[in-house]
Amino acid sequence: MSEVYANRRSRLRERCTAAGTAAALISRPANVRYLAGAAPQGAVMLLGKSEDLLVCAEPPDDRPTEGRPDEHLRVQVLPRSGGDPAVAAAELAAGQGAEALAVEEHHLTMARYRAVAAVAPGLRLADLGSAVEQLRVIKDEEEISCLRIGAEIADQALGELLESILVGRTERHLALELERRLVDHGADGPAFPTSVATGPNSGHRGHRPTDRRVEEGDFLTVCLGAAYRGYRCEIGRTFVIGTSPADWQIDLYDLVFAAQRAGREALAPGAAFRDVDRAARQVLDSAGYGVGLQPVTGHGVGLEIDEDPQLAPAAMGKLDACVPVTVEPGVHLPGRGGVRIDDTLVVRPEADGGPELLTITTKELLAL
Amino acid sequence: MSEVYANRRSRLRERCTAAGTAAALISRPANVRYLAGAAPQGAVMLLGKSEDLLVCAEPPDDRPTEGRPDEHLRVQVLPRSGGDPAVAAAELAAGQGAEALAVEEHHLTMARYRAVAAVAPGLRLADLGSAVEQLRVIKDEEEISCLRIGAEIADQALGELLESILVGRTERHLALELERRLVDHGADGPAFPTSVATGPNSGHRGHRPTDRRVEEGDFLTVCLGAAYRGYRCEIGRTFVIGTSPADWQIDLYDLVFAAQRAGREALAPGAAFRDVDRAARQVLDSAGYGVGLQPVTGHGVGLEIDEDPQLAPAAMGKLDACVPVTVEPGVHLPGRGGVRIDDTLVVRPEADGGPELLTITTKELLAL
């Protein structure tokens, strides 16, 4: 483990050198954590010409959930009111004799960019672009193991909820209950705001819980995830409340299930993002649900809950082994509700048994 | 109520016109909500030359907690994959014949800034700075009433916690329990991550809950707040666990209490920020706790939990009536713990009875 962060930094340095910039300033928190092992509030990482540094406004938190700074990395804590770590890092870069500094233009605000430029006028600023995000796409087994534990935690929390009485409880209470269970089972916290959607809200992507209560006959869609050691996964299931689902509910469920299975089965090293998306999407499309479908049917997960790749009609690129993605088609019928089914899987070659399903809660239509 | 948002936009327009820019693009979510009544995910507000618009990537959420867009304002929802609302708004501004557009350089990333500049090359970009944040400092009675309700909710949640058994429970569980109670009592959600700190962690500003359990003889510091209709308040209290506090605990509590009272009593229209800070700080300073004190002893609250003004030694400016602020001095002794006491108050003139205390939970040292 001890060389992991240094190796990541070497790979980034190769990219920077190839692009003509010896030094880089990384400010996006997930990128800082990826390269430095931890990302204290506001900290930035300097990939320096002579030395790499983690520059912080306050000392790193010592909670295990926050990660620990790589022991091979010098950590510089600014004095109180020492200002913006990005500006301090740019000064250090100039002090190391760098002539150019790549910054994350998609993360730095214009005001911080100007302050960085002002403190080191001799430094030519370049755009690092999403170089670190690209490095983050393929995960190592350590990272996948964090995702796997996170998925187990989410499965446990969801399983316990299903054993309790649901009718009469509000979406907001169910969501809070799930989040408490995630923490009980060892999560750092929820990976994203837990979504619980009942009746007409069901099947709606990213629905934020309301005070609506679960009623007999409802579809109930739950989407949750655990953060574990910084890594975030996602599971979504739809259930029906009461003993006998209506015919339209069974039909819609079967359709979304077929779409989700098609998406899962399309996951393989070398598969184009858009082909995975199309596999799932065309099942819904051909049943007449093409209009109003969500723009993506899946996405990468890792230190952030929504990272590259995007599984979408216009996405460019192909899957690699060891890329964890969600497959999450859904249909929402305004006024009636709908179905979403969402798994996190790791792309694996056929020879290794094909895609590894991390979220193992059943996808049968359960009547609760 | 119906003219509130239009009036806010007029005041901003006056400032812009005075600064020589007829149009402004507001992207910071709290600022968008302040001017438009709601800030759907990613939405921006265009203060246009001929018409104001709320430009959204998705339709506004209809939950009351998210606010409702001002009915006098045209809402433009971009088509799917319609790109960045900021870019679309800049195009609209150019289409209205604006020659210059002020943007929030402290919020827009460099990449978005470049995209805005590229889409409307004839438009001169200027910096809006913190013009909207400055408008937000003085609250109207509607805003204060939301803060007051939020404070009542936080008081209720805290009061209920105090009636329960605390010894043996972890910081994380107590924090989750408090957040559930906030929602039970009608909060949109917690105003910020609830802080529960026991024993050696107590008194530490912004402590993030760990798995440490409450023990007999501990100080217990709790800091929480409710968000209500978007407005966020804050309360912090320190208790002692067990029947008889140690002498050092009583002495430290009395000292922080005296500092906090001095800060509260210094709140008045016209009082300099730094004088309020000094009133609280010098009590701790003269007792030998000057080194290692937190950089601010209080701050404004509103649509964000930490907004202007900052009550700090180097802060410039004076309080006005109807500015809600926290007063929250604290002392943390490494390895032993400490005390924080935190209230939210609204600055009011002497003739109106002086500062209005929103968070009314007792500040006696309770032994639980």
Image: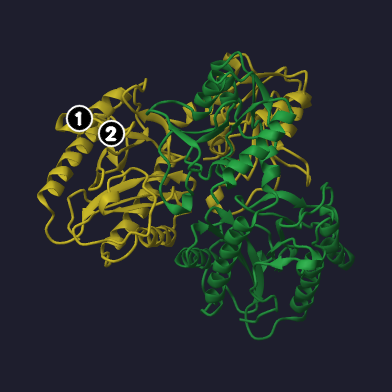
Chain colours: A green, B yellow
Q: Tell me if label 2 and label 1 are in contact, CB under 8 Å.
A: yes
Vertical placement of residue A305 versus B125, above or below: below
Report the residue marked by disc 2: B293
Position of residue B24 measured from the top left corner of the image (x, y, whole percent): 64, 25
Q: Could you say whether the residue bearing mark 2 is in a helix, strand or loop?
A: loop
State the residue at coordinates (48%, 34%): A74
Q: For the residue marked with disc 2, what is the amino acid?
A: Leu
Determine the chain carrying the residue at label 1. Answer: B
- Residue sitting nearer the eye, B229 or A347: A347
State the residue at coordinates (17%, 50%): B364
- Quarter holding the C terminus of chain A is bottom right
Report the residue marked by disc 1: B285
Q: Could you say whether the residue bearing mark 1 is in a helix, strand or loop?
A: helix
Residue B280, located in which quarter of the rendered image? top left
* Residue B98, visible in the rendered structure: yes
State the residue at coordinates (47%, 49%): A66
Vertical placement of residue A84 versus A234, above or below: above
